[in-house]
Image: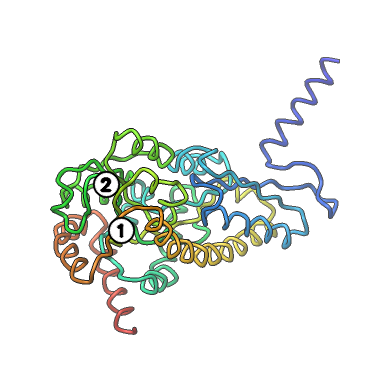
Amino acid sequence: MRKIIKLFLISLCILALTGCGGTSASGKEKIIIKYGTTLAPEHSLNKCGEYLKERMYELSDGRVEVQIFPSGQLGGEKAQIESLMAGGHDLHMGSQALISNWIPEYSVLDLPYLVYNEQEAEQLLKGEVGEKLLTALEDIGLYGMGWGENGFRLFTNNKNPVKHPEDFGGMIIRSMENKLMLDAMAHWGANPTPMSITEVYTALQQDTIDGQENPASLIYSQRFNEVQKYMSVSNHFYSPFVLYGSKAKIDRLPEDIKAMLFQACREACDYQIEVAREQNTQNIKDIEASGTEVYYFTDEDKSYWREKSEEIYEKYRPVIGEETFDYVMEEIEKIRGEQ
C-alpha cells in the first residue's frame, strides 16, 4: 500500500512540474498555462487574459487551458517577474518600468514626456525599437510576448491641486520601483516612495502617503479615487505594458503549442490596447464624476514640465546607453516628421 501511495504522489508531482492536467477534448494531454496580473479582474490586463484564454482554446482545439490569476494572487509585479525567470509560472502582464532594474536600456521608455500621444507610442513600440527591447528580455530568462498599453500616467493626491512641479511641496507620492521615475519625481519636488500596487489603497486611506501616480484605468479599478481629493491629467510618463513569458516554461512546450502561444499573445496584446484606451478615456470621466477635483494640463503646462525634466534626460543618457538613447530620439523625430 505504501508503494502505491508513493507512486501516486510522484505522479502528482510530475503533473505539477509539467503544467499538465487531465485530457483535452481532442484526447491529448491538457496543458495548463498560468497568467498572472496584479490588478483587479475588470482591468484591461485581465480582459487580455480572457481573450488569450479563448484564443488558445480555439487554436489548440481545447488542448491548452489558460488560467487567470488577477489582483496579485501570484504576488506583486517584481515577485511575478522573478517567478517567471525561475520558471515558477508561465505569463505575467505588467509594467515595463521594473525591467530597467535588469536591463538599463528599458529606462528610455520612462523618460518624462518622451512621447506626446498614443500614436507616437504605438509607432515606436511596434517598430524596430520595440522589437529590439522585447528580444533583449531573453538575456534574463524571459520572452517578450508583446506590448500592451497602461497609458499615460496621472497624479492624484489629498493635499492640493498639482499644476506645476512647485505644487508638490514634498508630498509623499507612491511611484513605481524604478530609479528614473523616482529621480524624476524627486526632481519635481515630491517625496517619492516605491510600494506594491496591492498596498496603495490602504496607504492612501490611512494617510501613510499623500498621493500616487498611475493611468486612469488603474486609478479607477483600484478605487484610489475614493480616497483622493485631486487628480491632474498630466500625462507625465507614458507607461506601456509588456506581456512577459517564462523562457524556461515556454521552451518546454511542444513546438506547435509554443507557436500558437506567441501568435495568440500578440493578438491579445492588440486587444488589450483597444480596451485600455477605452477604459482610460471613460475612467477619467468616472473619476471626475465621483467627486475628485480634476485639472487638465494645457500644452503650456506640459512644455514647462518637459523643460523642468531636462536634467533627467542628461543624467540618464549614459545609464540607458548613449547609442540606445540617441537611436530612440532619432526614431521619435522620424515618427513626428511623418505625422
**What's the amino acid at mark 2?**
Lys
In this view, the residue farthest toward the top is 2
Image location of residue 249, percent across then percent down: 60, 46
- Contact check, label 2 and label 1, Cβ < 8 Å: no
Q: Which quadrant does the N terminus fall into?
A: top right
Mark 1 lies on residue: 294
Q: How would you rate the neighbour count of disc 2 (Cα within 10 Å): few for under 14, some for 14-19, many for 20 or more?
A: some
Precedes in sequence: disc 2 or disc 1:
2
Image location of residue 17, percent across then percent down: 66, 36
Image location of residue 336, percent across then percent down: 30, 79
| Rendering quarter of residue 105 | bottom left
Q: What is the secondary structure assignment of the residue under circle 1?
A: strand
Q: Nearer the viewer, residue 311 or 203?
A: 203
Q: Which mark is residue 183?
A: none
In this view, the residue farthest toward the bottom is 338
Q: What is the secondary structure assignment of the residue under circle 2?
A: helix
- The residue at the point 27 percent across, 77 percent down is 333
From the image, state whether disc 2 or disc 1 is nearer to you.
1
Q: Nearer the viewer, residue 241 or 227?
A: 227
Image location of residue 71, percent across then percent down: 52, 42
Q: Which mark is residue 179?
A: 2
| Rendering quarter of residue 11 | top right
- The residue at the point 33 percent across, 43 percent down is 177
**What's the amino acid at mark 1?**
Val
Q: How would you rate the neighbour count of disc 1 (Cα within 10 Å): few for under 14, some for 14-19, many for 20 or more?
A: many
